[in-house]
Amino acid sequence: MNRKRLLAVAVILLFGAARLPVEHHLGKRMIDDGLQEPPIELGFRERLPQIGFMAALGGLRSLAASIFDLKAHIAFENNEWFANEQLYDLITALQPRRDSYWETGAWHRLRNASGHYRYRADDLPQSIRDRNIAYFSDSGFELLDLGLRTNPDSADLHASMAGYVNTLSVHSVRKDGRKAAGHYQRAFELTGREFYERMAAYERAKLPDLEDKTWAYETLLRHYRVFAARKDDRRGVPLSVRRTIGDLENALAIPLLKRIPQQQQAAPPGAGLVPESPTYERLQKNPAG
Amino acid sequence: MSNSSAAVSQPEPSMDLKKGLPLVLSKVLAIARNTFTQLVRMKVFYFLFAFSLILLVAGFFFADTQFEQKLKFFKDISYGFMLLFTTIFAIVGSALLIPRDIEDRTLYTILCKPVTRFEYLLGKYLGVIALVGLSLLFMDLIFSGALYVQEQRLLGPVLEAQAAVPAESAAGVQYATEADSIRKLGLNANTQKGVLSIFLTGAVLAAMAMLLSTFATSTMFTVTVGLCIFIVGYFQSLAREYFLSGSEGTWQKLLSVLVALIFPDFKAFHLSDAAASGELIANGLLLQLVGLALVYVVIYNLVAYLVFADKEV
């Protein structure tokens, strides 16, 4: 090998040594900023098809997740709930930073799979149906919990969890007012959307502790004043706000003079009579369907 | 006789007087233009029909899925094929040039003129980069147009429904969240940053393939080894992290450090996944990546020159 070729090899190696810390720092920063997913565990290989594993290790991780997502959608359409569950385990492992995958995976388990075994799987014995309902409920909450641990700042996941445990909805899977209030409050802190704060207040208003009721009263009163001050808004104060404040005034023994009027003032017919829906599920998620 | 010796001793002018460019640059650009024309004549742009067709199918694929799935799938497919076509152009384009010039004996006619081997290599590289850049630009135009149409189709009904309900209601919050998600996944600056990251990958890949072709014995060798290096380049970060993690095992450490030193880290430029998911890509980070790609290109071209300088053609 002549001198120039030796020099070429030396330049490649020296360049490699020089860029090593730079690329290490860049890679770490991109993972921290959520621009790249952390490396997947090698044990995960057993659960992935070979092509999926290559794609996942290589540069097509997002595409692999999208394709598995479509497969999961087909499994959902065919009521293949265990296949759907497995696919969402893969998808969330491929792109753990993408909160919508956790949310959709949990939704399939908590609403669709559980609902299927509760209302539609007539060909199965009741014992199996009950077992599957319990299984998918547990599995759904596990997925959502893991999703929240991975993405603690996802407002969508907090709101989603609150929706499954709130005490106000008939669709609630496991009622837990305190937990629901905590997740609604966190969703409010992350988004600034006042609806979430009101939902937290509705939940805490139902809790037995005086501290919770006082917080709920003060919060809802603040919202009430904002609504009432909107002279141009012909929709008026939401009925849920007015009614919950009324309940809290009784519970906290607020003096009559300090109580809010329970009748809508100078509002158009029908305004303020529609309660705020405690559930805001994904029914309208697909505008086409 | 005296005229001939006068012509030999006359120093070469340093400027191209016609174009007002430094002569070196003028020569490099002439070779680049020639290379680009040579590649375009191979009818490479026909791939755009295939790309458009893929996007058309991807756009209508699973029409009944949620909007997030639909937009993300469309972007993933588009970025995936952009990366694929860019990889092919960068590797095959670079791999074809030097062996073909040797085969056609064009190389002799170029190098017997006052053109240095470095100018020749740089011109070839810029020609390939022009092809990669232009093809990516065309793909980006098709992709952006299709994405915009998809975004508007999904956004329209959501905005209509949002206007019909109070903003503070549950439905209002839901529609606002949906509209935000659609805009995040739709056409925006991040979408273009994802395309730029693919171009950076192509630029580094082309430089690496050019380096390979300086000592390769055939086009097939360059293409095969180039593809292998591209794939290993995506795993390079695993080897680097293994080495830096201080794990035990002498041979494993030696192997991992060799992989980390020799192979480029293509994952470092991989921002298209983030762009497909609608993540915000900071301009500062993008600038750092442009800088890193530039260093790769300079070093690989320099090494290519060192190898090519003494090559017997």
Image (cartoon, coloured by chain):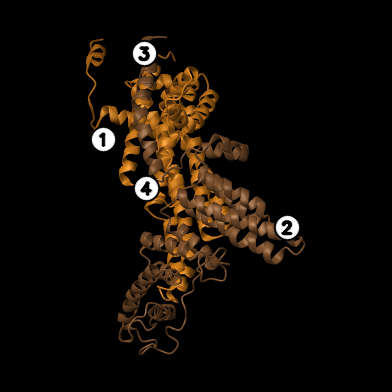
Chain colours: A brown, B orange
Identify residue for label 3. A4
Whether labels 2 and 1 belong to a single chain: the reply is no
Q: Which three-letter amino acid code belongs to the residue tagged 3? A: Lys
Element under label 3?
helix
Q: Tell me the SS state at disc 2.
A: helix
Report the Cα–Cα distance between label 2 and label 1.
Answer: 83 Å
Circle 2 is placed at which residue position? A128
Classify residue A227 by image quadrant. bottom left
Find the distance from the CA under tag 4 to the CA under tag 1: 40 Å
Dot in front, 4 or 2:
2
Q: Name the amino acid, label 2.
A: Ile
Q: Position of residue A201 (x, y in %)?
A: 40, 70
Which residue was labeled with disc 1?
Answer: B19
Instruction: For marks 3 and 4, give the one nearer the viewer.
Output: 4
Chain ID, mark 4: B
Label 4 vs label 1, nearer the camera = 4
- Which numbered marker is on residue B281? 4
Amino acid type, residue under disc 4 in the picture: Ile
Residue at point 39%, 71% (across, down): A213
Badge 3: few (under 14), some or many (20 or more) residues near its Cα, within 10 Å?
some
